[in-house]
Amino acid sequence: MSDLSAKAKASPNIAFIKYWGDRDPDLRIPANSSISMNLADLFTITSVAFQADLKADHLILNTRTISGTGLARVRKFLDRVRSMAGIDWFARVNSENNFPIGAGIASSASAFASLALAASSAAGLELSEAQLSSLARTGSGSACRSLPGGFVEWQAGDDHYSSYAFSIAPPEHWDLVDCIAIVSQVSKSIGSTEGHALAKTSPLQNSRLEDTPRRLEICRQAILNRDFEALAYICELDSNMMHAVMMTSSPPLLYWQPGTVEIMQAVQTWRKEGLPVFYTIDAGPNVHVLCQASFTEKITQKLEQIPGISKVLTSHPGGPAQLLAS
Ligand code: PMV
């Protein structure tokens, strides 16, 4: 036996109720629970081969060899898998996204979800969905929400085992479409790992956390009842609350650009005009504009008319991470 290998596919997810701030930054135990939707049309495929003759871990990302902090983060993750499986072989990891690299779409969720599934399977571990979700969380918090399918809740929990995500509705439950308006392709100067550490410096973070159970419940019910109006209200509120925390941290984080605000205002105008649509924004300038599938073309056309928007990507709800034949 000189090769233990596996390949897996996972999608990124868009958070409706956001995760911002960690209770345990090393294990990425979040300060609050969150809810998201997987994005079927975007995905990462990762293959992992633990090999007896390797002298170090190797990482290739979208055909480029990665070293430095990117490799160190993956090595730390592989160390966890090796210690769980009782093996000491190094690995070759090859990861590819079907969405454009540098498009400003966070790929760490799909990257670590596919890595968790491929690496654990290559190492011979048989993990439940919850165990895989907890494992993926240690690579990137939001990655734990990309293991289960469809509409997903991540219960914050209070230790490694109790902090994992589970599906609250399958992808077929509601055909929502995420129209992702790319405002900027420049990678952000403060990534989410650093951003989470700053959350507690904002005087608004505690109020945001205290109110989270209420927002989670409204969001859960809106999804279960396919109540678009309620979902629109709670998602925009939650995104604005997270960005208020970001902007009032020390040092402050302002991810928005003029194009970001232009889309936020346009979406509110379209809604007043009767179009069912809402926005939500992660740790970057790009805007996720959500609608029901039948409005996709109309919304995409409207977004493309806004000057400065270089591209609009669209995605329907996605299924769970899955193993592929390697
Ligand atoms: O998983 P991370 O560390 O990339 O954090 C994700 C943070 C947000 O995208 C801003 C919110 C979320 O819940 O996805």
Image (cartoon, rainbow, N blue to C red):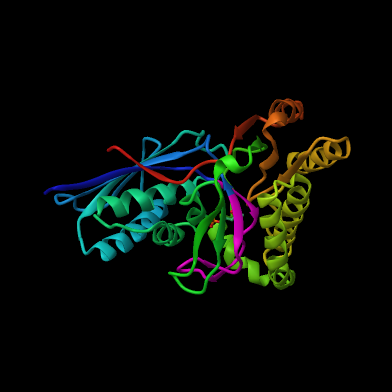
Tally of marks? 0
Could you say where residue 2 lies in the image, as x and y percent from the top left? 13, 48
Could you say where residue 285 lies in the image, as x and y percent from the top left? 67, 45
Q: Which quadrant holds the C terminus?
A: top left
Task: Note whether residue 72 is visible.
Answer: yes
Most foreground residue, 57 or 99: 99
- Quadrant of the rendered structure where residue 128 is? bottom left
Q: Residue at x 29, y 57 (%)?
A: 126
- Quadrant of the rendered structure where residue 69 is? bottom left
- Picture layout, residue 322 above or below residue 135: above
Q: Give yes or no for residue 28 being in the magenta stretch.
A: yes
Task: Note whether residue 257 is visible.
Answer: no
Could you say where residue 138 lies in the image, as x and y percent from the top left? 43, 62
- Picture layout, residue 49 above or below residue 98: below
- Picture layout, residue 9 above or below residue 31: above
Q: Residue at x 53, y 60 (%)?
A: 193
Q: Is residue 277 left or right of residue 216?
A: right
Most foreground residue, 98 or 298: 298
- Quadrant of the rendered structure where residue 257 is? top right
Write the start and end of the magenta stretch as one range.
Answer: 13-36
Most foreground residue, 18 or 63: 18
Most foreground residue, 8 or 230: 230
* Ligand 1 quadrant assignment: bottom right
Q: Give yes or no for residue 239 being in the magenta stretch.
A: no
Q: Residue at x 53, y 41 (%)?
A: 318
Q: Residue at x 67, y 32 (%)?
A: 293
Could you say where residue 209 lies in the image, as x and y percent from the top left? 68, 69
* Residue occupying the far left of the picture: 1
